[in-house]
Image (tube, helix red, strand yellow):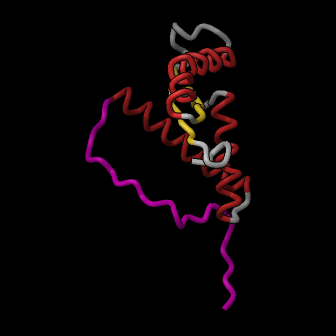
């Protein structure tokens, strides 16, 4: 709730695409727009009419890029996190991008070789300090 506007519900849908696929034979910016448009055609009417919320398609490539709407989404998310946790915006956005790159890499590896091993537990990031610099404590 309250992601884009106060008291509004926000819905997202993620698509990861391979820019080297034969079906993606257009320039990269146009490729992202095409996939965002497809997602909007599928879900936008339902979200607006039935759910009374906002819809943001998050389109990523396997090479680490992201569409225009995903970029806006992550910048807005980083701004909200930085204000809430009193962390500096550059540290927050770099942390989010770093986490996203590793998640995309893990997705690509799993799609290539399949899932192996036990499921891992996702650690809680609630108390995580996003500033990478040294911590100086006064005693």
Q: Position of residue 62 (x, y in %)?
A: 53, 27
Q: Main secondary structure of the magenta part?
A: loop
Residue positioned 40% across, 54% down in the render: 122
Residue positioned 67% across, 14% down in the render: 30
Q: Position of residue 93 (x, y in %)?
A: 67, 49
Q: Position of residue 43 (x, y in %)?
A: 51, 23
Quarter of image, res 61: top right
Going by the image, does 29 lie left or right of 37? right
The C terminus lies in which quarter of the figure? bottom right
Instruction: Out of 53 and 12, give the one closest to the viewer.
Output: 53
Magenta segment includes 117: yes
Looking at the image, how many numbered discs can be counted on the residues? 0
The answer to whether residue 106 is seen in the rendering is yes
95 over 84 or under it: above or below: above
The answer to whether residue 63 is seen in the rendering is no
112 over 87 or under it: above or below: above
Going by the image, does 11 lie left or right of 31? left
Residue furthest to the bottom: 139
Magenta segment includes 123: yes
Residue positioned 26% across, 47% down in the render: 118
Q: Position of residue 54 (x, y in %)?
A: 60, 34
Instruction: Out of 133 and 79, give the one closest to the viewer.
Output: 79
Quarter of image, res 107: top left
**Magenta-tinted stretch:** 114-139
127 over 31 or under it: above or below: below
Residue positioned 68% across, 12% down in the render: 27
Quarter of image, res 91: bottom right
């Amino acid at each position: 709730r309250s992601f884009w506007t106060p008291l509004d519900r926000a819905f997202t849908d993620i698509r990861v695409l391979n820019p080297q696929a034969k079906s993606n034979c257009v320039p990269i910016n146009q490729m992202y727009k095409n996939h965002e448009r497809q997602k909007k055609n599928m879900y936008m009417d339902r979200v607006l009419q039935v759910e009374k919320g906002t819809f943001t398609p998050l389109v990523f490539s396997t090479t680490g890029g992201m569409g225009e709407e995903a970029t806006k989404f992550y910048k807005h998310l980083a701004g909200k996190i930085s204000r809430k946790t009193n962390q500096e915006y550059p540290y927050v956005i770099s942390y989010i991008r770093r986490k996203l790159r590793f998640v995309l890499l893990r997705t690509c590896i799993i799609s290539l070789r399949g899932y192996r091993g036990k499921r891992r537990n996702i650690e809680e990031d609630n108390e995580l300090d996003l500033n990478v610099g040294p911590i100086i404590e006064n005693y």
